[in-house]
Amino acid sequence: MISHPRPSRRRALALAVLIVASPAVAPAQAPKGPPPAKAAQAQIDPPEPFIPTAMFAVPDDLEVKLWARTPLFRNPSNIDIDAQGRIWVAEAYNYRRHAGKDPAGDRIMVIEDTNGDGVADKSSVFVQEESLLAPLGVAVIDNKIIVSCAPDLIVYTDVNRDGKFDPAIDKREVLLTGFDGRNHDHSLHSVTFGPDGKWYFNHGNAGAKFTDRSGRTFRNGSHYDPGKSGGGIPQNDQRPPEYAGQKSDDGHVYVGGTAFRMDADGKNVEAIGFNFRNSYEQTVTSFGDVFHNDNDDPPAARTSYLQEYGNLGFNSRDGVRSWNADKRPGQTTQIAEWRQDDPGTVPAGDVYGNGAPTGIVTYEGDALGAKWRGVLLSCETSRNVVFGYFPKAEGAGYKLDRFPFLTTNKNEEFGGIDSQRGKLRADDLKTWFRPSDVAVGPDGAIYVADWFDPRTGGHAALDSSFAGAIYRITPKGKKLTTPKIDLSTTEGQIAALKNPAVNVRALGFMKLKEAGASSVNPVAALLKDSNPYVRGRAVFLLAQLGSQGLAKTEEQLRNSDPLMRIAAFRALRRVNHRVLENARVLANDSSPAVRRDVAIAMRDVPLDGSREILLAIAKGYDGKDRAYLEAWGTGCTGKEAAMYTALAATAPGQDAAKWPASYANLIWRLTPVGAETAFAARANATSLTEKDRIAAVTALGFIPTKASAFALVDTAQKAGGAVKDHAMWWLLNYKDLRWKDAGIDAVLKERGLYDPATVSVTPSVVPEPEATKLPAASEIAKLKGDVAKGAASAQACLLCHSIGGKGNDYGPALNGFGKAQTAEVVINAIINPSADISHGFDGMQLNLKDGGQVHGIVLSNGDPIIIKSMGGLTQMIPSSKVRNRMPLGRSLMLSAEQLGLTAQDVANIAAYLKTQ
């Protein structure tokens, strides 16, 4: 796997075929057809065809049971649960290299527990079509089954409601089309019904060029082409790099993975967040908050609050540059990959390292007990876990503290994941748990689908049994049953709206909305419900029940709970009712989260209507809250210059170096033309912290004027240390792009900052290690390590790594590495560093025209090539001095023997790293 850019999606997309027999169930018919194409990797026999429930760790008050398994269905890529408690499974049997394995196409299956004993006993095929090729999403909203299968978002209407698609009776409609990356998991994902009655969905950075039913075209491209990197089947006449940076018909630029909401008929599509790598799914709370997860490139997977209209930072603003092309001096991968130091990107959330997240859901029910109400559950296939979070309001954003909710791998002894180059633990069943989705049933239970396989990502599918399973989580010792909902009565419709299953709630919403004014009183009664999420649903629905409902919604703008005020404001925005009037009042709300939403609502409001509202919100900024700052910046979209003029009139003094953060950061977020002098003053102010000075350099880097470029030249000449490094980085990386007409090459030469003719290149070669004579890692692990001696010996590691803030950032930081791995893994990394190279640290070899080589990590592929070598040596090498370049093919790190370490030294270092 390479990482510039990575060609594959680390997902638990591993195929399953009906091979395993189960006496408890009647198998669905196994597909017939030609054998699959010759696989790149051999299939592996599993120790067992599913995970025994005894292997799972689950909270003490809950229990997990096997609900269904192959042969009731094939590998599950996504699931949904209907009002009858039936689980609908999207299979991806023909995924990637297995395309054509079943010539009849992939299937949507319906799995049932007909006798209510907590175990499924029946399965049936709803639909199987040749056109279904590795669908990544299924949603069931009433009798509409929505299937996400690039290039199409397909709606099957089960007219006679018999659970089987019959083209002679039922309807099939392609609602939207144009999502690129067919048979590629960076493409179109599942639909979720929101509390506002909208349908929410997303696609990954495979790109999309589609037109909604209102006639508006959306263009979501980037430098990533799934047809060239990753094996996706191209779908559009233009490739994503060709339309990267182009405006969509709503007047905005969206790049990379993007999330949307729309009307159920495919009209009024609206992008609500963009620039992901590959968010697999979204969850929409009953207050309208959206959370999602995102796949990493190197180790930086995340779970995030999707702030509305937010740029999540994976690509450059125009989509043409990958994050690693813009990684700046001293930035960690976690900061650089999501561009957290750049104005215009929202907070990344919980960035937890290597990962391959998939399904996600918010549990809003009461059946598991009050303790679990509001828990956010996110599937993580690489780590064999379903993570849990209780999002905690923190300013205008959310704090996400992670914990393992369900796992087979408490000790995190991973296998078959990309960070280990796919190294398998084929005989270790705990690493085969690949949770592809999580959903809440109408009974209040939590259901987790397992795409069972020893490998996740890498386009591999190695399980020879092609098995899958669904597990059911309930309160310990308590039986949960699916309620019978009578939608013909108002009482039944209210019961549906209150149901914990997200798409079941749609049934009540639609019926109550259809009844109009007669629903106002029963829905308004829910405003006093003991469950706050039910109260949130009531607010959104009331706004769509006519004048009486609107009046009751507006009353909630004065609710003591800020979440209810936010829900009410959002609900009124959805129906475009008195938005500006309410925004003027809420711009001074006591809650920064309320003010956040007001700021966001100003994005498309002309200056005359939004100026005073945005200025009021700016006054409420505390100088620290990044989510708040970005929301305000979103509101200023297209009005940056005018808002800078308005803010300049209130500047706290003429000396920019003395501006408080509450003012300086607002200007930084705008990065307006005309602020070059102010940022230059801050960049060169030794009274400011290095962090503040680098932020000013960054602002200059984003201003495309000659004045900004020359301010950076001045800073590079005057400043030292990291400030100088950052100024030079911007100049060398963008001199031929942002400032191509500024004559920067001549100025740099004249000032003595960079002259390619006088550059002297220092060869730097990492010698290839001989075969090790040290004992195996398993043997060294048996030695008793001495922590104190290990601390001394670990000084050798500082040549490349940082430990406790000391050393170099040439290799991955080692803080936390030892704690997260077994002793054997740590030891093997020391004695055989080429066995497992972390993503983002692949070595490159530059062959010089004058002879010699430079080994290192390329920081910039421009001219000059910037490369960092062992010991932190960073060189700017003119392209004219390089004959060619090639992957090094081994680690840039010296082995234990090359460092002069004995087996005992290695054991000591491993013991020391366990404490860091």
Image: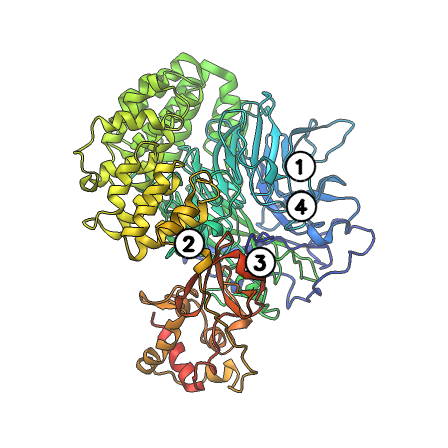
The kind of residue tagged 4 is: Gly
Give whichever of discs 2 and 4 has the lower sequence position.
4
Up/down of 903 relative to 518, above or below: below
Q: Which residue is mark 4?
A: 227
Which colour assignment does the render follow? rainbow
- Disc assigned to residue 151: 1
Extreme-top residue of the structure? 547
User: Disc 1 versus disc 3: distance between alpha carbons?
Assistant: 26 Å
Residue 508, x across and y down, in percent = 51, 27
Residue 822, x across and y down, in percent = 46, 72
Residue 377, x across and y down, in percent = 46, 48
Residue sitting nearer the eye, 173 or 519: 173
User: Disc 4 versus disc 3: distance between alpha carbons?
Assistant: 16 Å
Residue sitting nearer the eye, 780 or 570: 780
- Look at the image and tell me in which quarter the C terminus lies: bottom left
Q: Which residue is mark 3?
A: 2
